[in-house]
Amino acid sequence: MTPLQDINFKSLIAKETNGRMRIRLIALSHIQAGANRTETAKYLKVSRRIVNDWVAKFYAQGLEGLVEKRRSGRPAVLDSEQLQQFKKYVIANSIKNSGGRLKATDMAEYISKEFDIKYSIQNIYLILHKLNFSWITSRSRHPKQSQEIQDDFKKIPNGIDP
C-alpha cells in the first residue's frame, strides 16, 4: 500500500500525457487535499463508484493499479496474409497508365471480390492507415504523357537569348 501523503501528485499530473490517467491522478490529488470521494466525483463529473474504484486500485497496487489495461477490441476481419495481398494490390494499382486514380470504392470492390468480405468506405481508409498509406493523391498521368518530352522541356532555357 502506498499512502496518499507520500506522493507529489501535482508533478505527476504535469508530466502525464494520457488524459484518462491524468483524471485519475487529479482525483487522488483532490482526496489528498482533503476532499471526500463524493466531492471529488462531482468536481470531475464522474460517478462516485469510479472514484472509489480508482482509490481502491491505488491502495492495492499503487500507481501501477491506475494504468489503463489494453483493450482487445473486435478481431480484424482480414488476416495478415490478406492485408499483405491487399497492400500489393494498392501499390500495383495506385498509378495507372491509362490515367485516373485508385478510389476507395475500387478497393472495397477488390476486397469484396477477392476475399468475400464487405467493407465500408470509412473502413477502407482505416485499413489504408493501418498499412501506413497516407491519403495524399497526385495528379493522374495522362495516357499520352511522355517522360522524354518532359525531360527535353526542362532543358529549354528560361530567359530570352541575348
Image: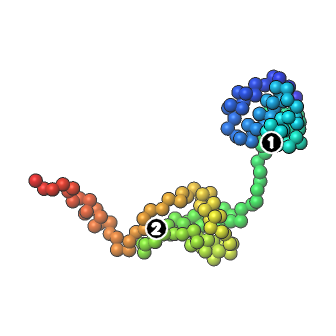
Identify the residue at horizontal 71%, vertical 41% (top origin): 19
Q: How is the image coloured?
A: rainbow
User: Residue 137, percent across and down?
Assistant: 48, 62
Q: Earlier in the sequence, mark 1 or mark 2?
A: 1
The amino acid type, in three-letter code, at marker 1 is Lys
The amino acid type, in three-letter code, at marker 2 is Ile
Identify the residue at horizontal 68%, vertical 72% (top origin): 118
**Which residue is the site of mark 2?**
95
| Image quadrant where residue 78 sits | bottom right
- Give the left or right position of residue 79, taking residue 90 as reference: right
| Image quadrant where residue 56 sits | top right
Label 2, secondary structure: give it: loop
Measure the C-alpha gap from mark 1 to mark 2: 51 Å
Q: Is residue 54 visible?
A: no
Residue 148, above or below 29: below
Q: Nearer the viewer, residue 156 or 131?
A: 156
Q: Nearer the viewer, mark 1 or mark 2?
A: 1
Tell me the tag on residue 45.
1
Label 1, secondary structure: give it: loop
The 10 Å Cα crowd at callout 1, few under 14, some 14 to 19, many 20 or more, is few
Residue 43, above or below 85: above
User: Residue 128, percent across and down?
Assistant: 59, 61
